[in-house]
Amino acid sequence: VLDQVGSWPSEWLRGLMELCVLRVIADGPTYGYAIAAVLERAGLGNPKGGTLYPLLGRLEQASWVRATWAAGDGGPGRKFYELTATGRDQFDRMRPVWSGFAAAVSRHLEEASMPGEDFFVATDPEGVHRV
Amino acid sequence: VSDKTTLEQTLAPDVEPAWAAQFIVACRLDGVPGDAIADALAEVNDHVRAAGGTAKEAFGPVASYVASLNLPHHRFSMREVGSPVVVGTLGMILVLMGVRPLRDGTPVGLTLGVTLGAGIAVAAILALVVWLGTRTSTTGLRLPALGLVALPVWLCVVLGSALLRQVIASVPAWPVLLLGVVVLGAGTALYGRMPDLTDPLTPPLGRRQGRSRALARLPGLRWSHCFPLLR
């Protein structure tokens, strides 16, 4: 299922990363690297810092997450993110939407025949299209 | 930040110094406030420290990472920055004019040169304040050109005050001194509200916030603005 470099297609990840990150933060206050590690363990690839932190910044600017600094494992400090009430509402709203969308895509990809066959052009053994 | 260590070592000891230095320069050129730069760099450091590897591997080229962060930008009002200096200086001049005559029990003699000079100076200052008020940053501000305009104005004020010494009016000393103290107080109050132009890069956990940061500036405020009174 994975593409040639061993990760999900980046177009898919770009669209879904926000929801996946909200899911991790919904479990409680956490920090950037821990979010990346959880996503990797969940089989969602290993998001680079250059992708993850701008996303966290956008979530903070949208007031979906709140950030606070605390002492980390040495260094100048560690920034912890937690969901705000707005962020939790947004996550609770988006999760069923995604589930519905994913189910629709799966149905679409796996069902053998689709209603509305009249839309398709049949091809005879000689390769000639006939309506 | 200690002079013995570089900014990069203090803010991001686990990040390649070259990457951290480029990050700071890129943010400064983009007008990002010091606190926001320090926060972003500290977060890069925490990630690199936990994940291993280099900042370049995890965050990519500095320029594109800075652009993707959408960090805030300074929006200094030049009027906000210039007004304390102008009002404070005017207060100092009035206080200096009033102190000696009050001590000697004589009125303040307004000479033709001082009156003309004050008129020119006030007009020039007002023009400058109004002009600066239309700007939102110092980018593109031609300071040498500004100096070339200010120098003849200043020479007119000084030479006029020195040469045109006939007294055209006398004013009691105490109103001049009182007005000076009031204007000086107004200048000091404006200074207290002025944004911190030094804008240092301090680690997120070692930072004074809001009121305590303003209070830290009080010693400098007291000495610079009370100097004419102490003389």
Image (spheres, rainbow, N blue to C red):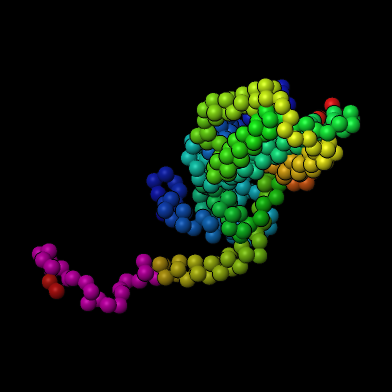
> Which one is nearer the viewer's eye here, A130 or A88?
A88
Q: Quadrant of the N terminus of chain B?
A: top right
Q: Where residue B108 appears, x then y in whole percent?
A: 80, 33
Residue B85 belongs to the span the image colors magenta: no
Residue A126 belongs to the span the image colors magenta: yes
Q: Is residue A24 above or below residue B170?
A: below
> Which one is nearer the viewer's eye here, B150 or A76?
B150
User: Looking at the image, can residue B87 be seen?
Assistant: yes
Q: Where residue B105 appears, x then y in whole percent?
A: 89, 31
Left or right placement of residue B63 versus residue B103 in this view:
left
Q: Quadrant of the C terminus of chain B?
A: top right
Q: Where residue A56 appears, x then y in whole percent?
A: 58, 51
Left or right placement of residue B59 versus residue A67 in this view:
left
> Which one is nearer the viewer's eye here, B225 or A23?
B225
Q: Is residue B160 above or below residue A60?
A: above
Q: What residue is at 75 percent from the left and 46 percent from the top?
A: B210
Q: Where residue A104 appears, x then y in whole percent?
A: 42, 70
Residue B179 found in image quarter: top right
Q: What residue is at 76 percent from the left and 41 percent from the top?
A: B183
Residue B41 found in image quarter: top right
How many marks are shown on the rendered structure?
0
User: Looking at the image, can residue B78 be seen?
Assistant: no
Q: What residue is at 13 percent from the left and 68 percent from the top?
A: A129
Q: Is residue A129 above or below residue A80?
A: below
**Magenta segment:** A107-129
Q: What residue is at 61 percent from the left and 26 percent from the top?
A: B156
Residue B107 found in image quarter: top right
